[in-house]
Image (spheres, helix red, strand yellow):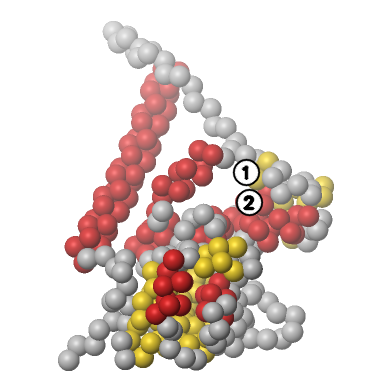
Amino acid sequence: MKKNHPFEKFATRKKNSAIKEEFRQEKRKIKKERAERIELQKQARRAAGAAGQTNGPRQEGRTAPARPAIVKKVNEQMPLNKYIAHCGVCSRRDAVDFIKEGKVKVNDVVVLEPGYKLTDQDEVKLSGKKLFPARNLVYILLNKPKDYITTSEDTHGRKTVLDLVKGATTERIYPIGRLDRNTTGVLLLTNDGELTQKLSHPSFEVRKTYEVRLDKPLTKAHFDRIVAGITLEDGPVQIDALAYADAADRSIVGIELHSGRNRIVRRIFESLGYDVRNLDRVIFGNLTKKNVERGKWRFLKDKEIRLLKFMNSSFTRKSKVED
């Protein structure tokens, strides 16, 4: 007999037809944006060709075409912390710390302002090492086991998630977000600073789903309190969905939320008197740990990368307008 998926009972679970339609709409959107970019490139090439004809020798009996407007290439300015993130060194947030600590120089002058605007003519150094924007972007999905911490390096000699992907790439990669030492499951590592910023932004609302094993059954009263919204020491928490994963064992629950606050899932249940025995992240954005054994990893597929980058694109457009 086919075993039901532990999270089938989520109240917000969508029908397969709705999920398929979302994928179709996403695919159409990507194709449309690609076609628009190609058309813009064609227009730019036609304009450049027309300009060349106008500046060249005129031929007898032919009327010279109208001279198009001259398009000048303008050096785009980029905030210093964003540039450092694009170089694959760290996230924008960590870049801010490096800058304020005086470790960053622009044209051999220390700059302490993270928002300092750069052009493509500027030379940036971090701790004396010249930085270059990352060209080979790498995306790795890891099924994190226990007893590994999600930092690039640890001064106490503890095992980090980078030990598990050692040799996967020569690029410097780092984890997006954090899973505490005893939490397992889906973790994304990359050197794409822009994507890191998007997925780490608290307002970007990246979906995260966890399987939680408690020391005792979750009561119906506490179930309802969590669904209604619960207040912790650092403010209220609103989850997206909650379900008993196994009707026969109510100490196992599935919880979905968008919050990225520190240890948020553990603190929700601990505030109600439960001890979280095991916490496993089964979904992050559009990524699952399917076919990836604990402690193993794989590179993301092109389609997965595109969906990550276009996920919640309405928020991305809104942010750019507000900036």
Local SS, label 2: helix
Local SS, label 1: strand
Q: Judge by depth and name the residue closer to the eye, 284 or 210.
A: 210
* Disc sitting over residue 78 in the figure: 1
Q: Judge by depth and name the residue closer to the eye, 52 or 70.
A: 70
Crowd tier of the residue under label 1, counting other residues whose Cα lies within 10 Å: few below 14, some 14–19, many 20 or above? some
Residue at 75% from the left image edge and 80% from the top image edge: 155
Q: Position of residue 103 (x, y in %)?
A: 79, 58
Q: Judge by depth and name the residue closer to the eye, 8 or 267.
A: 267
Q: Position of residue 166 (x, y in %)?
A: 56, 81
Residue at 42% from the left image edge and 28% from the top image edge: 48
Residue at 34% from the left image edge and 62% from the top image edge: 303
Residue at 49% from the left image edge and 55% from the top image edge: 204
* Disc sitting over residue 296 in the figure: none
Mark positioned earlier in the residue sequence (2 or 1): 1
Q: Based on the displayed image, in which of its 4 quarters is residue 99 positioned? A: bottom right
Judged from this view, the residue extending furthest toward the front is 221
Left or right of 320 on screen, residue 61: left
User: Residue 51, relative to residue 174: is it above or below?
Assistant: above
Q: Position of residue 39 (x, y in %)?
A: 33, 37
Q: Which residue is mark 2?
A: 83
Cβ–Cβ below 8 Å for labels 2 and 1?
Answer: yes
Amino acid, disc 1: Met
User: Residue 121, relative to residue 68: is it above or below?
Assistant: below
User: Residue 272, relative to residue 75: is it above or below?
Assistant: below
Q: Based on the displayed image, in which of its 4 quarters is residue 210 positioned? A: bottom left
Left or right of 313 on screen, residue 4: left
**Residue 2 visible within the image:** yes
Q: Position of residue 319 (x, y in %)?
A: 51, 44
The quadrant in which the N terminus is found is bottom left
The quadrant in which the C terminus is found is top right
